Image (tube, grey):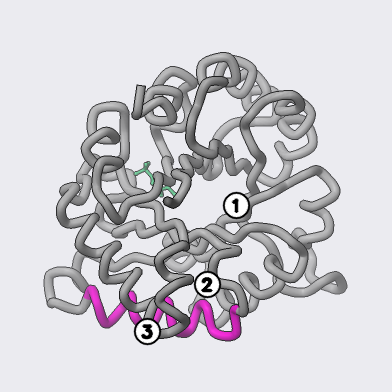
Amino acid sequence: MRKAIIAGNWKMNNTASEGVALVNALAPLVKEATCDVAVCVPAIDIPAVSEALKGTNIALGAENVHFAEKGAYTGEISAAMLKEYGVKYVIIGHSERRQYFGETDETVNKRTLTALKAGLIPIVCVGETLEERETGKTEQVLYRQLKEGLAGVEDLTALVIAYEPVWAIGTGKTATAQQANETIGFIRKTLGELFCEKCAAKVRIQYGGSMNAGNCKELMAQEEIDGGLIGGASLKADAFAAIVNYDK
Ligand code: 13P
């Protein structure tokens, strides 16, 4: 049995004080959660949000991490810097980073290996664009992202995968529960081929893309879907709590 994990991705939203207010409102609403709960927040919010999360069942995540341990990388944040504030998860290779910030399967791979080495749990994002889906390239793209992005990973079960079809992010278009389940099934099968079937059966794979209070139950009922990575709906305490409490 895989334990579900529902994580918010705040993206570039919430100042530190807004973030603290959000988690203060959220904590009492999710304290009975049966799944793992996390909020992945902008780097500059981390110190304040880390403090506000003390004594709650909500874990802290970051939205990116640099692949070097330290050094001359102006503007970047290292794994050790995140660890010092109790960060547990880190999103790697989000499609917005691939699209706007030159992230490639190679940089995803380097960041993933660095995060694992530091004891962070990477949430590695994969997903196809609308054009790739419409031209029948979904499986080919996912295969490449997994093979190259996860090359050299020794313990697959130490990370989380997020399947986020790019066309469903922030668009209000969700993959149907069946589409998401099928594609995540393909991801798991591929991981079985690239690593081992036993580890692939254990690794948690989230769905992300316009997941909300209205569609989360159906998505979470799918056999292959082990959680959600939530953008817009994670910015309001009640909307995010409704997803975390999908089984209530
Ligand atoms: P939305 O939930 O806003 O579609 O964003 C999904 C996402 O990109 C989470 O990482």
Please report the residue visible at 55 percent of the width from the left and 82 percent of the height from the top. 106
Could you give the CA–CA distance between mark 1 and mark 3, rounded to whole angstroms? 29 Å
Relative to 139, does residue 160 appear above or below in the rendering? above
Relative to 175, does residue 232 appear above or below in the rendering? above
Residue 11 x %, y %: 52, 44
Residue 248 x %, y %: 36, 21
- Label 3 sits on what residue type? Glu
As drawn, is 201 to the left or to the right of 154?
Answer: left
Residue assigned mark 2: 103
Residue 141 x %, y %: 31, 78
Which of label 2 and label 1 is nearer to you? 1
- Magenta stretch containing residue 164, yes or no? no
- Label 1 sits on what residue type? Glu
Please report the residue visible at 59 percent of the width from the left and 79 percent of the height from the top. 153
Residue assigned mark 1: 63
Please report the residue visible at 58 percent of the width from the left and 38 percent of the height from the top. 39
Q: Quadrant of residue 145?
A: bottom left
Please report the residue visible at 26 percent of the width from the left and 44 percent of the height from the top. 171
Q: Quadrant of residue 119?
A: bottom right
For the question of whether residue 184 can be seen, the reply is yes
Which of label 1 and label 3 is nearer to you? 3
Report the magenta residues as a range.
Answer: 138-153
Residue assigned mark 3: 193
As drawn, is 19 to the left or to the right of 73?
Answer: left
Q: Of label 2 and label 3, which has the lower sequence position?
A: 2
Crowd tier of the residue under label 1, counting other residues whose Cα lies within 10 Å: few below 14, some 14–19, many 20 or above: many
- Label 2 sits on what residue type? Glu
